[in-house]
Image (spheres, coloured by chain):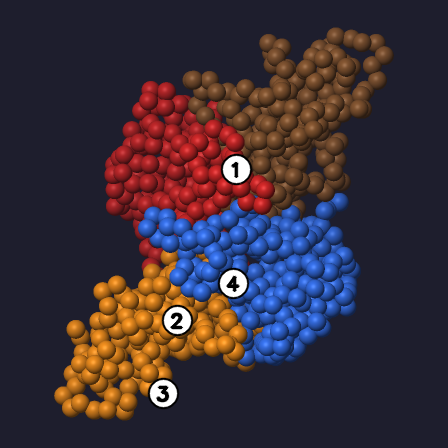
Chain colours: A red, B orange, C brown, D blue
């Protein structure tokens, strides 16, 4: 009896996500984006969400579709503006969505801190820039740092390559990106994978996200998006 | 208050549980599917009493989940030990990780239960288990402080009294602390106690009445 | 001061380097065996000019070391892209890691060189490359601030002048900063400059004398 | 031309370690202990060392032998006292060695911070205990934390299982322990491995320590210590 649930559908995987939740969404551009979970979240209907993700959606699919559906109140991300971020751009310019820009490494490290029980940390990134505004500055050994606080999620929606039936995960290439960190930082971590295998089929030396961080897993059809466009 | 029926009061020293029996009691109380760290020494024995289908996953601080039983004979591998440096085995679905990741897992509150030994536990959950405070003692904390503040539930497994008869569940620890208010339950040879901000609650007793225990401990 | 001989002064606009030629100059200056991050856009071209035996290892912020060239045709894999989301390949000896590890590598000072584009660089090494400051601009920082303060040497590759002829190497940045005093060298179509606490030093020039450049920039 | 050197002997691997250096030494008990590098360090002669390691030596080999040779001024570790730590115990009781006890997770996280460019971090471990003495305390979101600073090494001596010729490393089972973190926290990281293989022979998804953290690698004969005693 594993604590991790293997569920039958993406819809089952996203049950219970409440209005107003903070949802960490994996992916760097399209790579690692949990498309099926996001589509299910759109069907599920939760609104007034705060989304934490590296980008603010590409094309008209995935996160962009969630934004277009009007479910997102605020985005924390490092890089909203891209060639294909027209959905976000439009909402932002119309004042229909809040944006908090966080340097990419701080986004990752602040989620790591949340998962690792660190209360706050002094980080050299963004010292002396507009993104330092309102942050506590401190000099340590002659270098300046800003105090950064953890970013916690109520839910994480991430994509991985394989899971075993206990919930151990491995990823594929640069689709790994934010998945492992987000899995540690959310109260409930929901994962879509290409395949669920038996315990013992993953190399224990190569497991990237141990099962302790994984709450629900759903196997989906292989992703069929293209790199630069819609899937 | 739950107590074991005790119609004929007996000197409790004759009926207290052996440590192996106590390990079975702790094992009984660990919810199926939990992620659990068992401290060095007595708590290690709890693993022997977990049902095979419990789905309990054991964490060892030196970088592994789904640790299996002690290794014997040819299965001994010097690269695979538990926190007590005892050779162990790996179960299907195991995962290895480095020390920073292992302690991030602990400190981040991801373990459901850890079970530690103790010199003393205070009524409010303070824990003393790393240092006798003696002038000749060499201090050695290991992962005790990290575990104490990390797991969702910290259980202590110990004898209730020292060899000289002093209670180890005390109003206030006199030994140096490992963690503040961190213990939620204490399993002893004489009984099981919930501890915390609301004080002590006796859950069950072995060969002694709850009233006698309460008197003896000054509850 | 090192300058390219320029016996016949010419309008430098006719002799400045094309961006691809400039990429070759940057590649020439990267020490063999270095660990290097090439920013999105123009710096990406530097990879094409690194000799095969240079041993330079490319890092991409989205979690990879030993990144290979752009993927073409069947080699395109949506799970393998660079920081600009362009499909790339992996070289023998590659390694993948997650985002916190990737940025720990950057922030921890382990990269030897990173090369970034810029709107402006100040004489003392301040960098502005993430935000025009315009009221309609959507701010997007990506990994620029992390790279700016992380690599041992931060190089900038840019045109020296805007389309309207304003210098981009300036006494003080007027655009919002990416990092303070972080740039050590600036590669431009008109010349290469060391910048930092001691101010600007012209290393080489292309089709223009150092004196003319110094005058134009107000050095 | 890789920046990582593959050297022919443990003696070549430890050249240049100066008197007074801070040396991070991998291993948890015997597992992962870089025995050959430590033996070479004893021959090399550097003295007045500060050693950062989880334990303070077991039996009479490895770190214990370095201590017995009188080369160590101070030990930072979490767990010096063990059944077989007689060398350390004797030196400590004679006042011949300094000890700083650091909770095991803080030891790991402080080295991670050094490697990750974090100036300091707020950690809940040891609040209200004697090990909090002298540390800055701060309450964040109702919980108390102590401010912890990075631990940097001049050198790290670690053991791994395999390296490729570029210096990428994989470990074996719980011998991984402190190796990956120490590799990030030292100016010069020196690794002994069971075998050096060609680039491309390690699975890029399973590399634990990327080559960027590795300066020198030496292949040694398979370790032949036993779990509880001398090798």
Do marks 4 and 2 share a chain?
no
Q: Are marks 3 and 4 in contact (CB under 8 Å)?
A: no
Do marks 4 and 1 share a chain?
no
User: Alpha carbon of mark 3 to alpha carbon of mark 4: how far?
Assistant: 32 Å
Provide the residue designation for mark 3: B164
On what subunit does the disc labeled 2 rest? B
- Numbered disc in front, either 3 or 4: 3
Dot 1 surroundings within 10 Å: few (below 14), some, or many (20 or more)?
many
Provide the residue designation for mark 2: B128
User: Alpha carbon of mark 3 to alpha carbon of mark 1: how far?
Assistant: 58 Å
Dot 3 surroundings within 10 Å: few (below 14), some, or many (20 or more)?
few
Do marks 3 and 2 share a chain?
yes
On what subunit does the disc labeled 4 rest? D
Looking at marks 3 and 2 on the same chain, the residue that comes earlier in the sequence is marked by 2
The percent coordinates of residue C1 (x first, y second) are 80, 24
The percent coordinates of residue A208 (x first, y second) are 49, 53
**In the rendered view, does B187 fall on the left or right side of A119?**
left
User: Alpha carbon of mark 3 to alpha carbon of mark 2: how far?
Assistant: 18 Å
Q: Are marks 4 and 1 in contact (CB under 8 Å)?
A: no
Q: Are marks 2 and 1 in contact (CB under 8 Å)?
A: no
User: Alpha carbon of mark 4 to alpha carbon of mark 1: how far?
Assistant: 28 Å
Provide the residue designation for mark 1: A125
* Residue in the picture at 66% in, 77% down: D60
Closer to the camera, A166 or B24? B24
| Secondary structure under the numbered disc 4 in the rendered image | loop
Provide the residue designation for mark 4: D102
Q: Are marks 4 and 2 in contact (CB under 8 Å)?
A: no
């Amino acid at each position: 009896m594993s604590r991790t649930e293997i569920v039958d559908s993406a819809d089952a995987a996203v049950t219970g996500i409440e209005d107003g939740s903070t949802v960490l969404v994996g992916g760097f551009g399209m790579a690692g984006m949990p498309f099926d979970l996001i589509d299910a979240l759109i069907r599920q209907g939760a609104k007034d969400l705060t989304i934490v993700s590296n980008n603010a959606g590409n094309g008209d699919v995935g996160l962009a579709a969630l934004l277009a559906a009007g479910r997102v109140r605020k985005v924390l991300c490092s890089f909203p503006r891209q060639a294909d971020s027209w959905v976000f751009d439009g909402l932002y310019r119309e004042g229909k969505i809040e944006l908090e820009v966080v340097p990419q490494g701080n986004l990752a490290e602040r989620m790591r801190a949340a998962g690792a029980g660190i209360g706050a940390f002094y980080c050299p990134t963004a010292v002396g820039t507009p993104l330092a505004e309102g942050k506590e500055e401190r000099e340590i050994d002659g270098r300046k740092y800003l105090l950064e606080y953890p970013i916690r999620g109520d839910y994480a929606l991430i994509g991985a390559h394989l899971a075993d039936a206990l919930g151990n995960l491995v990823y594929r290439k640069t689709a790994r990106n934010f998945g492992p960190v987000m899995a540690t930082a959310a109260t409930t971590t929901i994962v879509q994978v290409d395949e669920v295998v038996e315990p013992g089929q993953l190399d224990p030396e190569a497991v990237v996200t141990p099962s302790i961080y994984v709450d629900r897993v759903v196997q989906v059809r292989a992703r069929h998006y293209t790199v630069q466009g819609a899937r | 208050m739950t107590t074991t029926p005790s119609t004929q009061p007996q000197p409790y020293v004759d009926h207290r549980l052996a440590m192996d029996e106590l390990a079975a009691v702790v094992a009984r109380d660990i919810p199926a599917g939990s992620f659990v760290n068992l401290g060095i020494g007595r708590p290690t024995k709890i693993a022997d009493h977990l049902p095979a289908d419990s789905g309990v996953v054991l964490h060892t601080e030196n970088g592994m989940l789904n640790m299996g039983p002690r290794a014997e004979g040819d299965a001994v591998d010097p690269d695979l030990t538990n926190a007590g440096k005892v050779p162990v085995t790996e179960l299907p679905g195991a995962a290895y990780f480095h020390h920073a990741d292992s302690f991030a897992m602990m400190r981040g509150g991801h373990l459901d239960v850890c079970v530690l030994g103790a010199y003393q536990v205070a009524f409010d959950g303070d824990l003393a288990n790393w240092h006798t405070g003696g002038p000749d003692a060499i201090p050695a904390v290991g992962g005790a402080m990290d575990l104490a503040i990390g797991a969702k539930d910290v259980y202590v497994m110990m004898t209730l009294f020292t060899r000289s008869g002093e209670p180890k569940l005390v109003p206030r620890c006199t030994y140096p602390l490992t963690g503040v208010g961190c213990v939620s339950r204490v399993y002893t040879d004489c009984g099981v106690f919930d501890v915390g901000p609301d004080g002590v609650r006796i859950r069950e007793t072995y060969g002694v009445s709850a009233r006698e225990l309460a008197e003896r401990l000054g509850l």
